Image (spheres, rainbow, N blue to C red):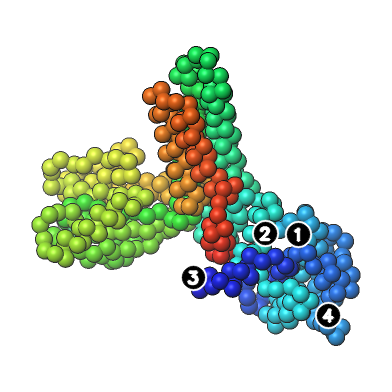
Amino acid sequence: MADQSPDRQGAREAGGTIVACATPPGRGGVAVIRVSGEAVRAMTAEILGQVPPARSACLVSLTDSSGELLDRGLALFFPAPNSFTGEDVLELQVHGSPVVCDLLVARICELGARPAGPGEFSRRAFLNDRMDLAQAEAVADLIDAASAAAARAAARSLRGAFSEAVEALVSRLTGLRAHLEATLDFPDEEVNPLEDRTLKEGFEELGIRFGRVSEAAERGRILRDGLNVVISGRPNAGKSSLMNVLAGEPAAIVADEPGTTRDLVRAEISIEGIPVELIDTAGLRSAGGGVEREGVRRARAARDEADLVLNVWDAAAGGRQPRPAGRTIVVRNKIDLTGETPGAAGDRTVSLSARTGAGLDSLREILAEAAGGSAEGVFSARSRQVNSLKEANRRFLAAGSLFGQGHSAELVAEELRLAQEHLGEITGAVGSDDLLGEIFSQFCIGK
Ligand SMILES: Nc1nc2c(ncn2[C@@H]2O[C@H](COP(=O)(O)OP(=O)(O)O)[C@@H](O)[C@H]2O)c(=O)[nH]1
Ligand SMILES: [Mg+2]
């Protein structure tokens, strides 16, 4: 983290008027320079000889300190608070020359602005309540989106879909807490909270809502980060063969000899535009030497972190086939030897042959579904947000079970309060400067 030095960190946090080229470096038709802060109006008058009317494009001449022409372009003035940052903002559309941009940025700095740090415009937008943290992060995710589905999901978060879902959870949590605390205020009334229907139904309904929002957020996270798929199973089941046929290249060594794959082998593929990382692992068995044992340890660790596990099973070998569970899909391989029909049985078991390719399409469909499916109604999310949501849900479940066991309303209310705090981390209602610094430092400059 080279740009975390104290002076730059300090500069980023300082106020003042900031300037940056918002378009990527290099030559192009048009470049956009953005200026935000309290001195924008005065600077605008100086460089343009006028302050253009609010929010309308105006053809202007841009001059240096001696009055000489630097470029002609369009100026847009957004007076506070109706701008991206909530401050006075000037946007200049000039010819896309890096030299012209540098001259203009230097000219604006001469007049008292300073170069913006990464994400500083978005950070101001957040601090001035123009958007919450989930929306600010969605801006960055929209810019970074690797697929159409990811871009649509980010646009939904930017519009506020994720924030609204979180706010709805918060308002219901607050309602439950208020209701619980009311029973604290009237201890003499001898009401048994367990028989209180409003509370009971409140817990049930909120539980369902938590589930729905968590699922959508998890799908959004996968759309953004890609799907991580671990291929696991016994030695010689055909894991490496499956990896190679999915990857379309001989990424891993295939051999008759059990114990061939010892380290993790990775391949990146794309399914419906969503990045999928395939990880081939050493077969799980207790025999083998030290290197193989380390391979097995790595295989287990990878499996624990996977979004999805393909448990490959040699259909020709017989024995007791593992059951699909949670994130695990059972792949019955080598059906060219058994003659069974290729394809999926339910959404968690698929029969195929890595050798002939029969049944592979069914597996690809299952992977596509896991990677986001239609992505209908999904909003973009980051692992930071998914983790906060999980923590909030954990606290909420704890509150529910304390409530069910008849514990004091105070104890239950405290767990609900903690759940609410974790939800606040998502939108930035609760959060530290360190967290904000970390998030915005990953944005690009000019955003
Ligand atoms: N007949 C047949 N043989 C296969 C199939 N998939 C893999 N094999 C063979 O099974 C052996 C072990 O394959 P490999 O991919 O190295 O298994 P791994 O140890 O699980 O990675 C090799 O000889 C492969 O050619 C299949 O679908 N049909
Ligand atoms: Mg192998």
In the figure, 410 relative to 288: above or below? above
Give left or right: position of 212 versus 125: left
Numbered circle sitting on residue 135:
none
Q: Are marks 1 and 2 in contact (CB under 8 Å)?
A: yes
Q: Nearer the viewer, residue 284 or 253?
A: 284
Q: Earlier in the sequence, mark 1 or mark 2?
A: 1
Label 4 and label 3: CA atoms lie apart by: 37 Å
User: Does dot 1 land on a helix, a strand or a loop?
Assistant: loop
Q: Nearer the viewer, mark 4 or mark 2?
A: 2
| Earlier-in-chain disc, 4 versus 3 | 3
Q: Nearer the viewer, residue 258 or 425?
A: 425
Element class at badge 4: strand
Residue flagged by tag 2: what amino acid is it?
Arg
User: Mark 2 = which residue?
Assistant: 124
Q: Amino acid at mark 1?
A: Glu
Secondary element under disc 2, as helix, strand or loop, is: helix
First in sequence: mark 1 vs mark 3:
3
Mark 3 — residue? 1
Q: Amino acid at mark 4?
A: Thr
215 w.r.t. 49: above or below: above
Rendered image: mark on residue 63: 4
| Residue farthest to the front, as pictured | 188
Is 417 or 67 nearer to us in this picture? 417
